Amino acid sequence: MDGRPHDHNYKGKVCVTGAAGFLASWLIKRLLLSGYHVIGTVRDPGDDNKVGHLWKLEGARERLHIVKADLMVDGSFDAPIMGCHGVFHTASPVAILRPAVDGTLNVLRSCKKNPCLRRVVLTSSSSTVRARDDFEPGMLLDESCWSSEELCERLKVWYALSKTQAERAAWKFCEENNIDLVTLLPSFVVGPSLSPALSSTVSDVLGLLRGEKDKFEFYGRMGFVHIDDVALSHILLYENEDAKGRHLCSSTVLDNDELVAILSARYPALPIPKRFEKLDRAHYDFDVSKLKGLGMKFRSIEEMFDDCVQSLKEQGHLSLITSTDH
Ligand SMILES: NC(=O)c1ccc[n+]([C@@H]2O[C@H](COP(=O)([O-])OP(=O)(O)OC[C@H]3O[C@@H](n4cnc5c(N)ncnc54)[C@H](OP(=O)(O)O)[C@@H]3O)[C@@H](O)[C@H]2O)c1
């Protein structure tokens, strides 16, 4: 396959925003393997430390273009998005709240100008669903649930607030402008990082494996999902005509105590914390039947952590681990 439009395997041209990120890198890997032509946006295409890993992906030399775009610059995405059939908006600004909403609307305004556009897949988050104070015991949260903005403000959980506001703004804009939008709501993403630079999620996992408690103490109960399943779910939502609305994307929900019990039994040489202080956190699960109904199968908690630990070892972050570990 040479990746040109006359090629019978050609799947069309798509844009991925924030291409060098943890999640976007895996999405691009999967899109290239599926035969797509990918326009990836980053803020600095010349920074080889950030984008070098993308050029090593299979098909990258033939079908990947990396271009500059910034969420905070109006019209910055016009050129990258023009002519694309699909847009995967994964980029997320470091400064949150207004920038998250403004950045998303900036991308969507560029989508509106593109007559070739078929569908936009927005990477939202399960935090747009689970920040609530009306839990009943054992509550099953599905896509009809929205996090309480008032609660997020009161508890100062700015990430959940910004993702909730950004997703709500995206739905409003796309409904008003007749853009076909689907959203994916991953829980905490675990797995190998293609980039040598550690994203904040991977750093949190590395911290836990090295014995740090702070982050997971605060997280309490949380859903987990394999990075490759998140990448595949994005493509499933783009390709499947039946996909409509929001889609929770999560394998297993665990209390932090349950998580460390599994991990310390599996990796006995790692100084994983044994237990956490019991916080008064609600017990909930995610109903992921919508994504499963489209054919998605999720890897287990063991598989996602095995793959993550393996990659952290290969990258030299867990170099002191003995060979008796998985
Ligand atoms: N990781 C998780 O557990 C998780 C779970 C649920 C949802 N999500 C969502 O998934 C998406 C990706 O997350 P991630 O974990 O892959 O994070 P990440 O590795 O930090 O990637 C985020 C990307 O956003 C880009 N970005 C930041 N500010 C930008 C700006 N002003 N203009 C353009 N691009 C900008 C960065 O690109 P450059 O610095 O290269 O420009 C970066 O590569 C986010 O929307 C996040 O909310 C993540």
Image (cartoon, rainbow, N blue to C red):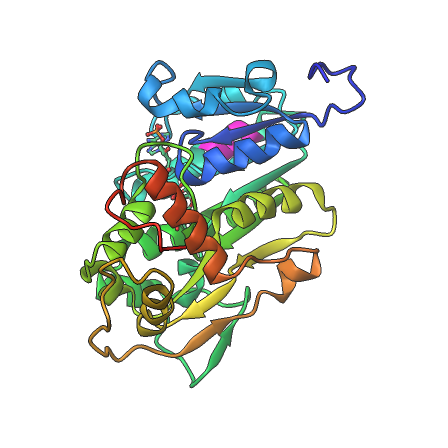
Q: Residue at x 42, y 31 (%)?
A: 18
Q: Does 108 appear in magenta?
A: yes
Q: Residue at x 76, y 25 (%)?
A: 9
Looking at the image, the residue that sits furthest to the bottom is: 137
Q: Is residue 63 left or right of residue 189?
A: right
Examine the residues drawn in magenta and state their main secondary structure. Answer: helix
Q: Is residue 70 left or right of residue 59?
A: left
Q: Is residue 195 above or below residue 251?
A: above
Q: Residue at x 40, y 70 (%)?
A: 254
Q: Does 292 appear in magenta?
A: no
Picture quarter with the N terminus: top right
Q: Is residue 235 visible?
A: yes
Question: How many circles with numbers are drawn on the protein?
Answer: 0
Q: Which residues are magenta?
A: 107-111
Q: Quadrant of residue 279?
A: bottom left
What is the x, y in percent for residue 32? 61, 28
What is the x, y in percent for residue 239? 70, 41
Q: Is residue 23 above or below residue 217?
A: above
Q: Is residue 119 above or below residue 307?
A: above
What is the x, y in percent for residue 13? 64, 24
Q: Is residue 315 above or below residue 181?
A: above
Q: Nearer the viewer, residue 210 or 19?
A: 210
Q: Residue at x 64, y 46 (%)?
A: 237
Q: Is residue 30 left or right of residue 308?
A: right
Q: Is residue 173 visible?
A: no
What is the x, y in percent for residue 252? 48, 66
